[in-house]
Amino acid sequence: MFLESISAFSLQGSNLGSLLKSASANGSLTPPSCYSSSSSLALSRKRDDGFACYASSRTASMQLTGVVFQPFEEVKRDDFMVPVVPNVSLARQRFIEECEAAINEQINVEYNVSYVYHSMYAYFDRDNVALKGLAKFFKDSSEEERDHAQKLMKYQNIRGGRVKLHSILMPPADFDHAEKGDALYAMELALSLEKLTNEKLLKLHSVADSNNDPQLSDFIQTEYLQEQVEAIKKVAEYVTQLRMVGKGHGVWHFDQMLLHAGDGAL
């Protein structure tokens, strides 16, 4: 068997072999075609008991069919035109104004909560309160909420939106409570704030869903929701523990555990 151009096919014992034997000894047999989807093949020249397949020049003239994506035509749509107007985002795509406004609202929520926690830190750091563990906890909480706000600001810019910072309310400066004591009162307030923040995040997630914005939905779900429910669980445990220890020495012990262990009074 001889190999010419591509490959040789053995015809011994096949129906095609019988057909070739009945052909004229001096003639050449060329079946109509031996085409594949990507090339055109033809059989030519009988050589002993085999025929050689070779690429036909007809391939180049075959029309390309089945094309479903023509990028240079589709980019001509208005959706993909690059803006030339000054002060307009070039990256913005399928980002609804309602989603942009909801993100700015959530940024304000995170900053307000951070501000309250920072005020709590200042209160417990006073020399006549001197609960350093609680001061540390609320300072860390304030920084975490501020980080959440900054992460939302970065995402807003990624999507081509504009960050608009709203006003922040002045938080209280004192957290003493005649019945509960300052530690329990402040921790219960923190639990309410964490639940409020979670409610606002769920609202933002709902706005993203209603406007068919899966990128924003995934961002909120991945970066915030799981962490938020974990924070609610942790603060709820702190409230339970402070209710058990009362307002005396137990609060000091709880505070020391916060200060040195970092993970709460366990």
Image (cartoon, helix red, strand yellow):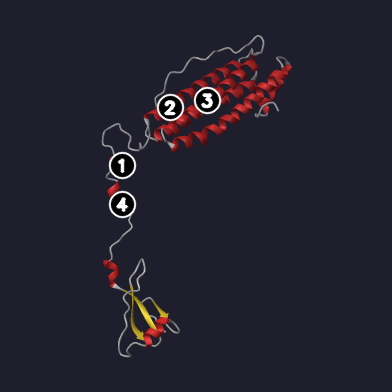
Quarter of the picture holding the C terminus? top right
Neighbor class of circle 4 (other Cα within 10 Å; few <14, some 14-19, many 20+) is: few
Secondary structure state at the residue bearing disc 3: helix
Asked if one can make out residue 2 in the rendered structure from this viewpoint, the answer is: no
Tag 4 residue? 70
Image height of 33 relative to 136, above or below: below
Q: Nearer the viewer, residue 124 or 38?
A: 38
For marks 1 and 4, the one nearer the N-term is 4
For marks 3 and 2, the one nearer the N-term is 2
Q: Amino acid at mark 2?
A: Ala
Image height of 33 relative to 105, above or below: below
Q: Nearer the viewer, residue 237 or 146?
A: 237
Q: Residue drawn at (47%, 30%), measured in percent from left and top?
A: 206
For marks 2 and 1, the one nearer the N-term is 1
> Which label number is shown at residue 199?
3
Nearer to us of marks 4 and 2 is: 4
Find out whether the residues at labels 2 and 1 contact each other: C-beta distance under 8 Å: no
Neighbor class of circle 2 (other Cα within 10 Å; few <14, some 14-19, many 20+) is: some
Secondary structure state at the residue bearing disc 1: helix
| Left or right for 258, reference 227 | right
> Which label number is shown at residue 80?
1
Q: Amino acid at mark 4?
A: Gln
> Which label number is shown at residue 102?
2
Separation of residues labelled 2 and 1 (CA atoms): 25 Å
Q: In which image quadrant can residue 209 be found?
A: top left
Residue 141's x, y, as percent? Answer: 57, 25
For marks 4 and 3, the one nearer the N-term is 4
Separation of residues labelled 3 and 1 (CA atoms): 36 Å
Q: Amino acid at mark 1?
A: Phe
